[in-house]
Image (tube, rainbow, N blue to C red):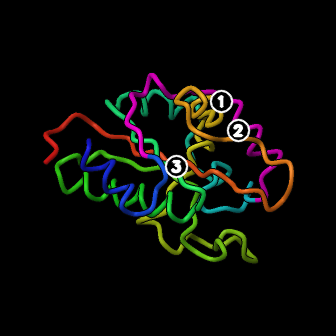
Amino acid sequence: MDKYINLALSLGATHAIAVTPDDIVFDGRTLLKCMFGCSDWGHGCTCPSRGNFLKPWELEPLLRKYKSVLIIHSPDKKIAQKASYAVEKEAYFDGDVMVFSMSDCAICPTCAGKEAGGGTCRDVRRARPAFHSVGIDVFATVKKLGLPLEALREEGEEQNWYAAVWLNEVSYT
């Protein structure tokens, strides 16, 4: 696991912490926060409002099958996503073929789903759902882990972005 922690940190992550799925706080009410508060709802290509997206209560049993979760923190959304995808890719090549990363998508300057007519994702190979959009209470999870996250009162305040990489027990090299 140290290999993946070091990789995430080398790509600019502020923190990278390995935990188990039992350390993750699942709460399907996160879907309400997405529906009523996120401008991507009904538009974003990685949004749970898209057709055929699994609901939080369908995803939780799948995510609990993983053995460990690498939580990646950065004040920059692009860094969090880049680090999580790089860890996913490296773990895959190390033999963890079911590894899966989650991060708030920051690949494209403007999501194709927000364009007129609601286009399709331009980079489906790297686009991933947000950690919070799949029924995970990110605030409760990171607080439990001693990581920083506060509700922002003013626009322009530094944000904290979190990504997660779901890993299996394999012989990591």
Instruction: Indicate the secondary structure of the residue bearing disc 3.
Output: strand
In front of the other: 170 or 141: 141
Q: Residue at x 76, y 77 (%)?
A: 116
Instruction: Indicate the secondary structure of the residue bearing disc 2.
Output: helix
Q: How far apart are the alpha carbons under marks 2 and 3?
A: 22 Å
Q: Residue at x 55, y 41 (%)?
A: 54
Instruction: State the quadrant of the N terminus.
Output: top left
* Magenta-span inclusion, residue 93: no
Q: Decide: marks 2, 1 in contact (CB < 8 A)?
A: yes
Q: How far apart are the alpha carbons under marks 2 and 1?
A: 6 Å
**Residue interval drawn in magenta:** 16-39
Q: Residue furthest top?
A: 22
Name the residue beneath numbered marker 3.
73
Name the residue beneath numbered marker 2.
31
Q: Is residue 119 above or below residue 26?
A: below
Q: Position of residue 112 (x, y in %)?
A: 64, 74
Q: Seen in the image, is 125 located left or right of residue 156?
A: left
Amino acid type shown at disc 2: Leu
Return the disc, 1 or 3, that comes first in the chain's sequence.
1
Return the disc, 2 or 3, that comes first in the chain's sequence.
2
Name the residue beneath numbered marker 1.
28
In front of the other: label 1 or label 3? Answer: 3
